[in-house]
Image: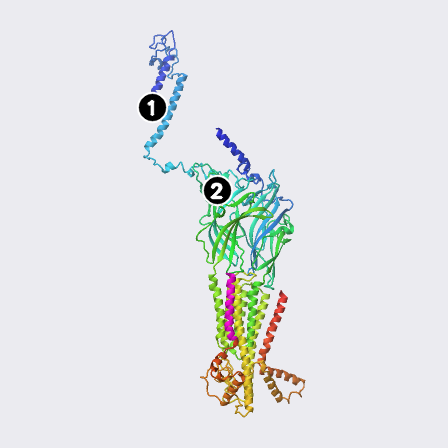
Amino acid sequence: MRPRVLFARVVLMLRALQRLSTNQSVCLPQSSLPSSQSTCSPQSSDPVLLLPPRRRCCGAPSILHGDPGCHGSTSEAVMPGYLRLLFVLLCLLLIGECRKHRSRKKRWSAPAETPKPGSPLAKKVADGTKSRKLKTTHLLRVDEHDFTMRPAFAGPAVPVGVDVQVESLDSISEVDMDFTMTLYLRHYWKDERLAFPSATNKSMTFDGRLVKKIWVPDVFFVHSKRSFIHDTTTDNIMLRVFPDGHVLYSLRVTVTAACNMDFSRFPLDSQTCTLELESYAYTDEDLMLYWKSGDESLSTDDRISLSQFLIQKFHTTSRLAFYSSTGWYNRLYINFTLRRHIFFFLLQTYFPATLMVMLSWVSFWIDRRAVPARVSLGITTVLTMSTIITGVNASMPRVSYIKAVDIYLWVSFVFVFLSVLEYAAVNYLTTVRDGKERKLREKVREQSCSQTLPCSCGIPHTKTMMLDGTYSEADANSLAGYTRASMPAEDASDKQEQMVVHLALDNESTGTKRKGIRSFRIIENTHTIDTYSRMIFPGAYILFNLIYWCVYC
Amino acid sequence: GLKLQGRIRVDLKMKKLDSTKSLLIKSEQLLRIEDHDFAMRPGFGGSALPVGIDVQVESIDSISEVNMDFTMTLYLRHYWQDDRLAFPSSSNKSRTFDSRLIKKIWVPDVFFVHSKRSFIHDTTMENIMLRVFPDGNILYSVRITVTALCSMDFSSFPLDTQNCSLELESYAYNENDLMLYWKNGNDSLRTDEIVLSQFFVEDFQPSFGLAFYSSTGWYNRLYINFILRRHIFFFMLQTYFPTMLMVMLSWVSFWIDRRAVPARVSLGITTVLTMSTIITGVSASMPQVSYVKAVDIYLWASFLFVFLSVIEYAAVNYFTTVEEMKKLKNAKIPSSYNANQAMAFDGCFHDNDIDLPSFPEAASTPNTERNTQSRNSTISAPSEGTRLRRRNTIKHNLNFIMSNSYMIDSYSRVIFPLAYLLFNIIYWSLYA
């Protein structure tokens, strides 16, 4: 209805009411009425007749006494009770209509906006963050409770389930005897103070900022040296609250923990390390830590790999730990076994050591008269072995027992050392024999001098061993002769001498000696010690290797 | 209507058990934290507050000689009474809290004297425990890793024993305000199984002392003393054994013919080089102290032995040359003989004409030589006085040595090993 129409109708109604009221009560019975112009007949016996009062009667500024017909009638009409009630009702109706009209007017004046299904407008009702009433803290009623106390404080222990996903094993250090691991640590517990009403059963997810306001279990890593929660780009913490009060709290942690390693079989060893989780403050009576899914609580990324180790297995255990001052605590263990890859050490340590030992055997095949050569060969291999040994120990902790690699290196060192000693013995015995030879030669010379044989009593042309590793010509004729071809002309006496010496020293001279003398001489160039060493040293080393690898593999 | 009433009733029932849900019984209200000023210690203005200390050593992480410090991880527990924290309780059970309450109440400010670095572990939450008993007794436990200074004396390294101690003291409160004491006397200090690779932990002893600071007064100080004995095995294998082998290798030189000049020289020099490498290797992991360590004595004595073997060969070589010269002069030299060839450039002897006995078995020749010499000098020897005789004997000895330079080698073969053995006996009996 248009307002004007409405207003007009109301006015009409009011006027009607007014007339009605004046008709009934206005005219008073007055006996002495002058000739008035009032046409109203108050003494109408018929009250029902509603005659509209004449204007003159009521409208004129009349004097009380002058106008009998309009006694006390002013311009205002006097309304009875029910009429007032009706009036009030009408006013109220009017107000209501006006209000509705206002909104309608606005709608009409604004550009047409039809809300589509799913539009922001339709969603506004569903997004609780925009409504001032539903702040998180209000939703979860955080300020109402005291979260410094655990759930069910002074009640039974709160069970907290733990779930771990190992992201990586960053490093394992032998010198420090520790390992570094990065893992996702998840806690599951129920806190009824955090229950909230929800139509769907969906959880609400929060990040690290809520953690400071609520209670979370204070799990720590026993025997850890350093640890931290990653905080790039924000604290890597997740909190998920379910409507019934169940909470899932997940963090990403890197921890460096101690691991007692036993190196007695290094580098053919296996190490077992454990990471231990425990609550710091709450004992067994307050907080029960347990693995959420038993042995399946521990999962690992597939790509965990270490350069030096093979990760054999991860498994979980759970125990109680007792502290005399504070009581019994639940402790969860993550155990893993690592087996070392031998290849690197084979290439770096075993192989060079073996080669050095073999190199020292080369010395037995070199002529024993090449003194500097054999000595320097022996000494250099000793020096290299010593360097290899120092190199291995640089990256190892200073343990008080012998390691497998130590055994190998020291035995190899002993072999190399013995080859040097062997040459010292050979040399010594050679010089002894040479000395004997010379003595004998002198005797022969003296004898030959004393006899009728022509002797060159002067200095014989014998040249003894030139110790730079070569032989002079004279020696070609001596017992340890080399080749005949390089023999120059000699004195007859010399030859005779040599022959005599030859005969004297070779007791078992046979006729065939001359023919086989060349081979004999070659054989005689090598000392018997050398000959035996060529077989004994390699044989002993191979035996040692067989024993070693059988014991440790 | 009725349903709603039922639910409310149930909630109320549970609420009674779980006091955390009740608005009235917040921990702070329970412990009446807001009522008191916890910036002041308990009994402020009164007598000193006794604070008991209990330590459980979890591990000794590392001991560094170069830095002269050690790193230890321990559980440090404090026990005291604070009446302001007493709360009414029917059962006598304590209430456990974690680190968030610490900031609101008073706790003793114990620090580690002479510590370099320390931290309270804070994964996943700060490793702090607070346990409050109804009568106001408090147990406050923290897990700490501390790196502290330990003056080490290396004069017997590596056969040494080090005494280190960790010292606890209150920073602000002197003995008029706070009395630190070991809670259970000698049993206050407990250790987990501590295994160190290089050391053997002999003893953990708590002790007590007072420390005086001229500006601030007397403070109670608690000491955690422990004795570490070093395992010698690693150094035996790494240092002593290679050194002994090098010295023995240098003796090999005495058995090689003295005419093998390059061989003997290279043998001597290479053993000196290896000794020098071993010495450098040991010093790399040690602090640069101003006194001599036991291992230094051993290494330098061995170095000296090896060095002397080289000097010995130089002497042998020199005397041999001299001898050869003499013999060249004395003996009949053919004209073709070229004295320069006596020792060629490669240092070898080309003793064409000279008969050089090189082994002790030819002992007859020196006797004959001596006889000839004595025959030559029969005039001078017996009739002279003692002085002449003495001078003669010295000169005679020198001549003797010079003419028998091989004897230096023969004696060295016996003297050097014996001397080294004697040195070892003295060394090990002194230090072990």
Q: Is residue B117 magenta?
A: no
How many numbered marks have been drawn onto this rendered protein structure?
A: 2
CA gap, disc 1 to disc 2? 63 Å
Name the residue located 36 percent from the left edge and 26 percent from the top edge: A97
Which chain is mark 2 on? A
Quarter of the figure with residue A507:
bottom right
Residue, far bottom: A452
Q: Residue A6 carries which label?
A: 1
Q: Which residue in the structure is indicated by mark 2?
A: A247
- Picture coordinates of residue B207, whole percent (x, y): 64, 53
Quarter of the figure with residue B242:
bottom right
- Tell me, yes or no, whether the two marked residues, 1 and 2, touch with CB atoms within 8 Å: no
Q: What residue type is labelled 2?
A: Val
Q: Are there few (<14), some (14-19), or many (20+) residues within 10 Å of tag 2?
A: many
Q: What element carries label 2?
A: strand
Measured along the vertical axis of the image, is residue B209 above or below residue B297?
above
- Picture coordinates of residue A131, whole percent (x, y): 42, 37
Measured along the vertical axis of the image, is residue B340 above or below residue A313?
below
Tell me, yes or no, if residue B70 can be seen here.
yes
What's the magenta region? A529-553
Q: What residue type is labelled 1?
A: Leu
Measured along the vertical axis of the image, is residue B384 above or below residue B227?
below
Label 1 or label 2, whichever comes before in sequence order:
1
